[in-house]
Image (tube, rainbow, N blue to C red):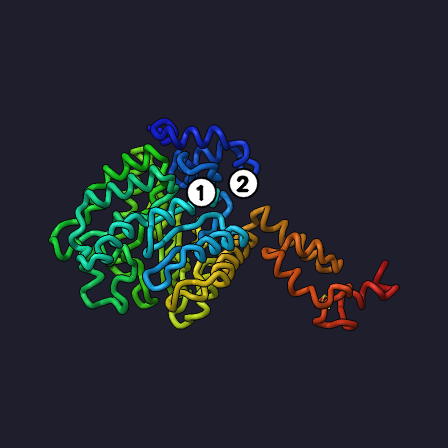
Amino acid sequence: MSILTQNAALAGLYEAHIDELVKKERLEADVIKQALENGTMVLLGNPEHPDVIPTLVGQPASVKVNANIGTSPLKNDFQCEMVKLQTAINAGADTVMDLSIGGDLDEIRQKMLSSTRLPLGTVPMYAVAQKYLDSDRDPADIQPDELFEEIEKQAKQGVDYMTVHCGLTMRGAEFATDGSRTMGIVSRGGSILARWMLKNGKENPLLTGYDRILEIARKYNVTLSLGDGLRPGAGTDAGDAAQWEEVMVLGQLAKRGLEAGVQCMIEGPGHVPLSEVEAQIISIKKLTHGAPLYVLGPLVIDSSPGYDHIAGAIGGAIAVKAGVDFLCYLTPAEHLTLPSVEDVHAGVMASRIAAQAAEACMGRPAAVERELGISRARKALDWEGMKTLALDPDMVEKRREEHKDKRECAMCGKFCAYKMIEEDPQCSN
Ligand code: SF4
């Protein structure tokens, strides 16, 4: 049955916003509708999130960029996270994920939901695990009902998409922990679930209770971001049995989701060598029936702490060209600490550059027009034009400030190549 027929919340969102989506994405309504029906595009937006901006994820809609923010037990400054939220919005993020694991998580989440119209994502497992870890209890003792109750509570609060690691199986966890991996399991949610399964000798409760999750997700049009609990955390682990075991299950779950009227995205790697990025993306897409693919990076090297936003953007550009739909940023703080406000800005910009690079080479009209427009403005020494078309207009203004009384910039001064040709009477004809 049609997803729009089964999912009333999605149908309402679609009907109310299709005209603006057509305009924004420069796509025909039929193209969008068909992609939603096929599960190759999702429309993020929980009607419980006040004034949410419904956001399409799935090429040929424009590639979207997500910024992860949120507290940690060691750096728990709620006000700072709110500044990061605004920084991510100002830098051009399309969505934000609240990954808080320190402090009053309900309060933080609700404040974020009321402070941004961008779709907000969460990982409900964190809130459940926090209760255990903060009281020195073993998260392997989590009761499955607690997970479903948390998912429902967050859906009611207005969360637009949720990472649920439903594809992590006992078999996958065993592959990932048999000693063959350099890094084992690097996902927070994945490691908690693997611990739960290994201690209890039972399958992943998010997998066995998937139908219950689907019921909640359909009611609130929560898009399920089917998590990659076994994503490779080192280049040497990319493409191993654990990763593919999980990807195959994720594909089955995305199909079940679509049949049940629930929108699903697939989360992807992770650390992947440059030479393997394209093959990974093509294969993941194939095994998951073309569902929107949401990747963390991918990081093409492991040795760039402090600069992982660059390693991630290199992988991200290749990944988008190979079919990725949604980039989760990495910041210079990755693998080191919680990102600062400046890190959030740098991370969003790096992912936006990756998306622009790929979309321009793929001939997407908006990206091509931006490239041509800024080149023309540059040749004309039209600084306002350059600022308007730059991915980061504030940066253009800031760097230009010192010499803004000059037509040329301080790089070459009187040697400015554009002025040299422009001022030559023989060249001006
Ligand atoms: S001064 Fe040099 S770098 Fe600056 S605008 Fe002219 S040619 Fe370009």
Left or right of 192: which side holds 316?
Answer: right
Relative to 155, residue 172 above or below: below
- The amino acid type of the residue labelled 1 equals Ser
Residue 218 visible from this viewpoint? yes
Left or right of 48: which side holds 141?
Answer: left
Sort mark 1 into few (<14), some (14-19) or many (20+) by Cα contacts within 10 Å.
some
Image quadrant containing the C terminus? bottom right
- The amino acid type of the residue labelled 2 equals Glu
Residue at the far right in the pictured view:
425
Q: Residue at x 84, y 65 (%)?
A: 423
> Where does the image place residue 116, in percent across and percent down from the top left?
47, 45
Do labels 2 and 1 touch, CB within 8 Å?
no
> Where does the image place residue 344, in percent across and percent down from the top left?
48, 59
Residue at the far top in the pictured view:
5
Separation of residues labelled 2 and 1 (CA atoms): 26 Å
Q: Quadrant of residue 199?
A: bottom left
Task: Please tell me the numbered disc located at residue 25.
Answer: 2
Task: Please tell me the numbered disc located at residue 114.
Answer: 1
Q: Is mark 2 within 8 Å of ligand 1?
A: no
Question: Tag 1, which secondary structure?
Answer: helix
